[in-house]
Amino acid sequence: MDINRPHQLGRTYEIVKNDNIKGERLFGTLISAVDKEVVVQTNNKTIILSEGESCYVRPMTWLSVQGERLTELRIDLHTAEIPLAYAFALFSSLGERFDSDEIIPINEDFSDAIAELENENSFFSARAEYILFGILQALAKSASSTAFSGYDGINTIAMYIDTHSSQPLEAGALAAMCGMSYPNFARRFHEIYGRSCKEHISYVRTVRARRLLMNTALDLTAIASETGFFDSSHLIRTYKKILGITPSSERKK
């Protein structure tokens, strides 16, 4: 199974054990060594985890993990229930970043929290959301020394997109919000987030549409309206392009 595609995660988080990894991760990934050494490598950094040690790898990062005993907690930040008061801190600390801080050593044992998540019968229960939010807070605290500094617009515009994705969004207007010309904004956005602003908006809307598709009885017209697409046809085209499957086929699965 191709575990790197967003539509195959199917929920805010997923827990996988003893699975060597190689390829781009679309999700934030918490890797924990159970009782043997684990080697974690990205394009820019390699670390070795001993028993009980962990690290967090940001979304959209090429990752290779080798080890016999490990636990992987995959987290889709875009579908996590994050209170707006915490959104900036969590997204800036744990979201996409394409430099030497793609991978962050974590000085905390998450085994008990992950075990609690495993015991949850529903992946969208209030208890699961509470546990996951606690993990995210702990990860952000550990990553604070490597988080973006300051609050300048280009480094925080992804948070604005995430919290306003159901509304009309234009790259030119977002550039103006950051006090930048559009060409400069487009170049810097791609440098920081690894894709164009338009592609990022489409991705955020699509993963939210998928959550509604899989967990509600709303029809495509209603889902398109709720997630910022022009209409159901626009949703279908974008969904297929990004996730490789049509919404109707996804729902049938």
Image (spheres, rainbow, N blue to C red):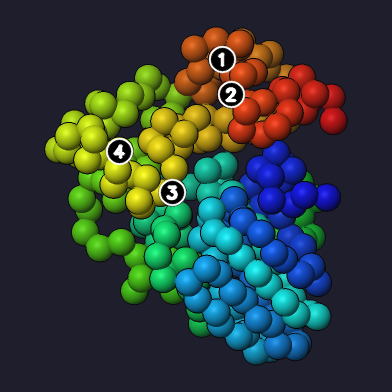
The first of marks 1 and 4 along the sequence is: 4
Q: Is disc 1 surrounded by few (<14), some (14 to 19) or many (20+) residues within 10 Å? A: few
Q: Is residue 85 visible?
A: no
Q: Position of residue 67 (x, y in %)?
A: 75, 80
Q: What residue is at 56 percent from the left and 46 percent from the top?
A: 80
Left or right of 8 on screen, residue 26: left
Q: Which residue is mark 4?
A: 186
Mark 4 or mark 2: which is in front?
4
| Discs 2, 3 touching: Cβ within 8 Å | no
| Discs 1, 4 touching: Cβ within 8 Å | no
The first of marks 3 and 1 along the sequence is: 3
Q: Secondary structure at mark 1?
A: helix
Viewport quadrant of the C terminus:
top right
Q: What residue is at 45 percent from the left and 37 percent from the top?
A: 200
Q: Which residue is mark 2?
A: 238
Amino acid carrying label 2: it is: Thr
Q: What residue is at 52 percent from the left and 68 percent from the top?
A: 43
The first of marks 2 and 3 along the sequence is: 3
Separation of residues labelled 2 and 1 (CA atoms): 6 Å
Please tell me whether residue 234 is drawn above or below residue 9 in the rendered image: above
Identify the disc placed on residue 194. Answer: 3
Q: Is disc 2 surrounded by few (<14), some (14 to 19) or many (20+) residues within 10 Å? A: many
Q: Secondary structure at mark 4?
A: helix
The first of marks 4 and 2 along the sequence is: 4
